[in-house]
Image (cartoon, rainbow, N blue to C red):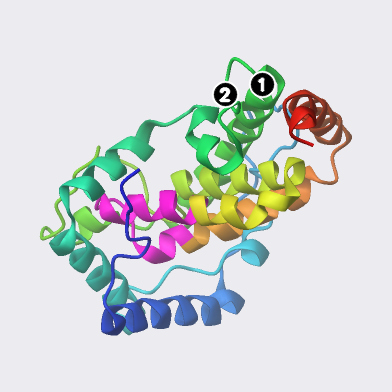
Amino acid sequence: MTSIRPWGLNRSLLARALLAGALLAAAAGHAQTGPAGAAAGKVHFVRTDTLDFAKVLPSPPEPGSLAAAADLNAVLQAQAWRTPDEAAWAKRIEKIRSLSEYTDVIGAWFTDDNLPATLALLKGVDADSKGATDASKKLFNRPRPFVGDPRVKPCVEPLDEPSYPSGHSTRFYLEAGVLSEIFPERRDALFERAQKMAWGRVLGGVHYPTDLEGGRLLAAAIVAELNENPAFEAALGKSRAEAEAFLAPAK
């Protein structure tokens, strides 16, 4: 597989992006309170639209602030340096919904056909997370980079919805968190993959770096809720048993 630069930044720009993250974290105490939960769809394990977003997520950078400028500069620099391989990666991670995306992290046997219980588990938690991403996007209502600045030219579908937090990044980090419960020895590799996948949204021109951090924080909060849920624990048990059949011969 072609190597994709996870952050695609030079040192100066990386410093500014990190500054944006630091200022974002510093704003945590000023985050808004989440709205009353709207009518939820089917809940597989936990309802996530009623999370306390004031505790989970800091507000995104204020328009016109140094942090917002650093966020935009990161997007523009990533776009300027975007290679054909990186554009292809951004398009690839835009649509993926298959376990096979993790075969190089977990094993060639990690496929939808081999692991139907694990596939159902991830589909369930991904569906549940939509309540949180929809509610938090509505709360913060941050415009997408290409809306805020016409110099940003997306190479993926320019979704007509708020930018913060990133829904794709939430899903990538959420899946990494769930799979880490099944394969704890692969935790670092799974989160490295989530980071690489999330960065594809900046490469694509549809998210700021701080949107990705918001997705990571939201995913962590959802995983914490899931770990208190008996149905989720039961589903994890089925997934562990399913995987054991493929892991056992290697022992």
The kind of residue on which mark 1 rests is Leu
The answer to whether the residue labelled 2 contacts the one labelled 1, judged by CB atoms less than 8 Å apart, is yes
Residue 129 at x, y percent in the picture = 60, 40
Q: Which residue in the structure is indicated by mark 2?
A: 111
Q: Is residue 34 shown left or right of residue 206?
A: right
- Which of 150/117 is in front? 117
Residue 16 or 183: which is nearer the viewer? Answer: 183
In this image, 132 relative to 1: left or right?
right
Residue 70 sits above or below residue 78 on the image = below
The residue under the point 34% across, 78% down is: 14
Q: Give the range drawn in magenta.
A: 194-212
The 10 Å Cα crowd at callout 2, few under 14, some 14 to 19, many 20 or more, is some
Quarter-of-image position of residue 191: bottom right
Quarter of the image that includes the C terminus: top right
Residue 220 visible? The answer is yes
3 is higher (above) or lower (below) than 13 = above
The kind of secondary structure element at disc 1 is: loop
Disc sitting over residue 115 in the figure: 1
Q: Can you give x and y, in whole percent of width and height, for residue 106 in the image?
A: 61, 39
